[in-house]
């Protein structure tokens, strides 16, 4: 028996899905997008309030972003980090300026989980000898060995590795008294200031300030995982700005490249001072196309005043969409959780199939999660409010 002569031969005998079947599929095949709209193969125009898991910050077909990525692809698609390139330096400088935080250094990688792995490595570098990391109940930090170890419930569901690379302690996200479990054995505390998968659940300024204080008392490194809630989604550059709490490191991804895979580890002074030559590394991180995508995304957010748009339109969502099956809201900015009196999964299905509106669910069965592009306008929110009224 040899290999099949052609791909067609191979497919005709296929016993497996060519794409590993690990993702449940929406009943929606997307051909293209325009702004906040998806156009499906069967000709439907679907309002996208989910943005591909919080990624499409500028929506679809953004002219300046598309041009920047295409121009970079033509001029120089790739050189490694060993080759100095102006575009990658510009991306780092612009991200630091965009943050309005005392960020001293940026390390670009490719995914949220990878940014978290590198943050953890830096935390253990800063705290040699400590072996424990504290995370919060209902957290999500990614699928890799370190990030998955800090993801609530992963050990029972999908973690897969025989052991975690460090000791892990999960503490309550509601009870500030639980912060006493952070001790001088704790190398790092990793938190999403606004939990995404956990249901667009905002920890709030008081909890985060108490957390900062406890980390200062014990010497634990504080890492904000802003992979989902950061980079403008909460209406400020980062949730650190929103809540006035400065962590030692921030990780961010998703919205950062508007769909071009990229992520970043933002280091404040203490962490930046501990970075040694060769301690971190990546092939694709900070590649010229990723850098061009990041630069174009920041330029668009600033020139189109999109943070103000997120603040204004998210307020409008909170004012107009607590109708029908929705009884309340949580989260911040365009990481909004609509609290429902019915299961969110049923509501999500009805919105998509009956009203052509794509939304998300979350780890909380009664929270419908909205993660729209930062360009969403009030008129589009009116369509959601009307659909919810009818489903009530
Ligand atoms: C808060 C948070 N951290 C980390 C991740 C992992 O990011 P990635 O899938 O890019 O590895 C996610 C993904 O949903 C996330 O929401």
Image (spheres, grey):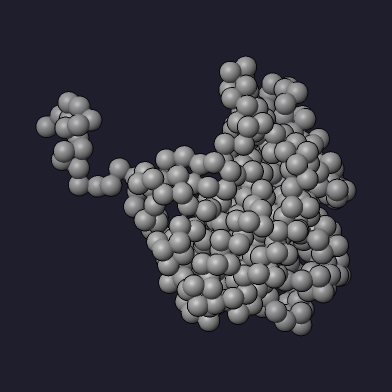
* Residue at the extreme left of the image, as rendered: 1
Asked if residue 336 shows in the view, the reply is yes
* Image location of residue 157, percent across then percent down: 44, 67
In the image: residue 113, left or right of residue 211: left
Task: Name the quadrant containing residue 301.
Answer: top right
In the image: residue 217, left or right of residue 29: right
* Image location of residue 53, percent across then percent down: 55, 54
Asked if residue 126 shows in the view, the reply is no
* Image location of residue 15, percent across then percent down: 20, 47
- Residue at horizontal 45 percent and vertical 61 percent from the top: 355
105 in relation to 68, above or below: below
Viewer-proximal residue among 368 and 38: 38
Q: Point out the image quarter for the N terminus.
A: top left
Task: Name the quadrant containing residue 41.
Answer: top left
* Image location of residue 319, percent across then percent down: 70, 70
In the image: residue 239, left or right of residue 201: right
- Residue at horizontal 56 percent and vertical 63 percent from the top: 384
313 in relation to 45, above or below: below
- Residue at horizontal 40 percent and vertical 61 percent from the top: 353
In the image: residue 380, left or right of residue 4: right
């Amino acid at each position: 028996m040899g290999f099949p002569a052609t791909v067609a031969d191979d497919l005709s005998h296929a016993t497996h899905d060519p794409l590993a079947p690990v993702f449940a599929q929406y009943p929606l095949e997307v051909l293209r997008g325009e702004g906040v709209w998806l156009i499906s193969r069967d000709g439907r125009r679907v309002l996208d309030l989910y943005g591909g898991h919080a990624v499409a910050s500028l929506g679809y077909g953004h002219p300046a972003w598309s041009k920047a990525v295409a121009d970079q692809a033509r001029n120089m698609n790739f050189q490694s980090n060993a080759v100095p390139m102006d575009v990658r330096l510009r991306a780092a400088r612009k991200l630091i300026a965009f943050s309005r935080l005392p960020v001293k250094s940026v390390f670009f990688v490719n995914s949220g989980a990878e940014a978290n792995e590198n943050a953890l490595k830096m935390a253990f570098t800063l705290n040699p000898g400590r072996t424990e990391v504290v995370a919060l109940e209902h957290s999500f930090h990614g699928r890799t060995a370190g990030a998955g170890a800090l993801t609530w419930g992963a050990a029972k569901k999908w973690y897969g590795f025989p052991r975690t690379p460090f000791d892990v302690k999960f503490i309550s996200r509601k009870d500030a008294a639980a912060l006493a479990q952070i001790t001088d054995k704790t190398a790092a505390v990793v938190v999403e200031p606004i939990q995404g998968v956990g249901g667009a659940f905002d920890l709030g300024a008081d909890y985060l300030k108490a957390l900062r204080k406890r980390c200062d008392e014990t010497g634990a490194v504080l890492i904000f995982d802003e992979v989902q809630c950061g980079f403008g989604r909460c209406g400020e550059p980062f949730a650190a700005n929103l809540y006035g709490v400065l962590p030692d490191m921030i990780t961010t991804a998703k919205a950062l490249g508007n769909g071009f895979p990229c992520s970043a580890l933002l280091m404040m002074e203490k962490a930046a001072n501990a970075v040694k030559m060769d301690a971190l590394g990546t092939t694709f991180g900070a590649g010229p196309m990723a850098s061009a995508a990041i630069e174009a995304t920041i330029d668009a957010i600033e020139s189109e005043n999109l943070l103000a748009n997120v603040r204004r339109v998210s307020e409008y969502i909170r004012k107009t969409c607590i109708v029908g099956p929705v009884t309340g809201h949580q989260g911040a900015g365009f990481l909004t959780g609509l609290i429902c009196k019915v299961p969110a999964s049923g509501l999500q299905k009805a919105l998509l199939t009956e009203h052509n509106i794509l939304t998300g669910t979350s780890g909380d069965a009664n929270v419908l999660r909205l993660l729209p592009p930062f360009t969403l306008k009030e008129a589009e929110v009116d369509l959601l409010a009307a659909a919810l009224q009818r489903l009530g």
